[in-house]
Image (cartoon, rainbow, N blue to C red):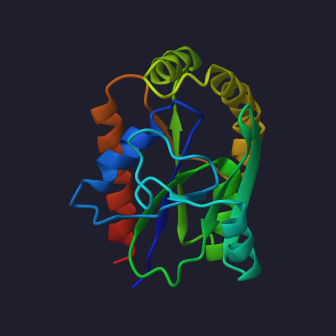
Amino acid sequence: MKFHIFYIMGKSASGKDTLYESLLEDPSLSLKPMIPWTTRPIRAKERDGVEYHFTDEAGLSSLREAGRVIEERTYQTEHGPWTYFTVDEGPVTHDLLGIGTLDSYVRLRAYYGEDCVVPIYVETEDSLRLERALKREKKPGNHRYEEMCRRFLADQQDFSEENLQRAGIRERFSNNDDRNDCVSQIAQYIRNIQEETL
């Protein structure tokens, strides 16, 4: 039996996290989370081993030395360098749902194979993304407005049309209007791929 890593990507505040949670909760998909790792500080309401595995630079170095780091990205933020990365946690034995960047998708695809890693690219209008990002940063414990602006500008380059085409992104899912419609479309796309490989 063949297994897949369905990998959600999109610019910041495009609704990826909410879509991710909804898809994981859909029993018809039988997806398990592919939990990324990071050296950034844990945020309010996050739990270690749920949203991310949280570690420090020493922990990252140990995983590197063990040859378990598949891909990593370090961002120079207003709060210092934060690294996000993916760790090889053993053979893939069931369909996974991951979330990340275009660059991390390309590296995962190179590591696991093009037939295993399936891209799910989410598009949202820039004005709507800015509204969502600002609303998120206004919540208690956030207020990282400089980081919000940095991410918005960086995403314009990272997810340029040229980069999307180079990465072979063909299917796109709009998250501008009804989120439930977007979830339904992605879920059906995943089911179709799962049925093709039974």
Is residue 166 something that shows in the picture? no
Front in this rendered view, residue 63 or 24:
63
Residue drawn where x is 73% and y is 53% of the image: 73
Residue 107: x and y in percent read 70, 63
Front in this rendered view, residue 75 or 5:
75
In the rendered image, the quadrant that contains the N terminus is bottom left
Residue drawn where x is 39% and y is 48% of the image: 20
Residue 112: x and y in percent read 61, 75
63 over 84 or under it: above or below: below
Q: Residue furthest left?
A: 27
Front in this rendered view, residue 56 or 106:
56
Residue 91: x and y in percent read 51, 84
Residue drawn where x is 42% and y is 46% of the image: 46
What count of labels does the image hold?
0
Say whether residue 58 is left or right of residue 134. right
In the rendered image, the quadrant that contains the C terminus is bottom left
Residue 77 position by quadrant: top right
Is residue 115 something that shows in the picture? yes
Residue 5: x and y in percent read 49, 66
Residue 156 position by quadrant: top right
Front in this rendered view, residue 109 or 70:
70
Residue drawn where x is 46% and y is 24% of the image: 136
Say whether residue 65 is left or right of residue 152. right
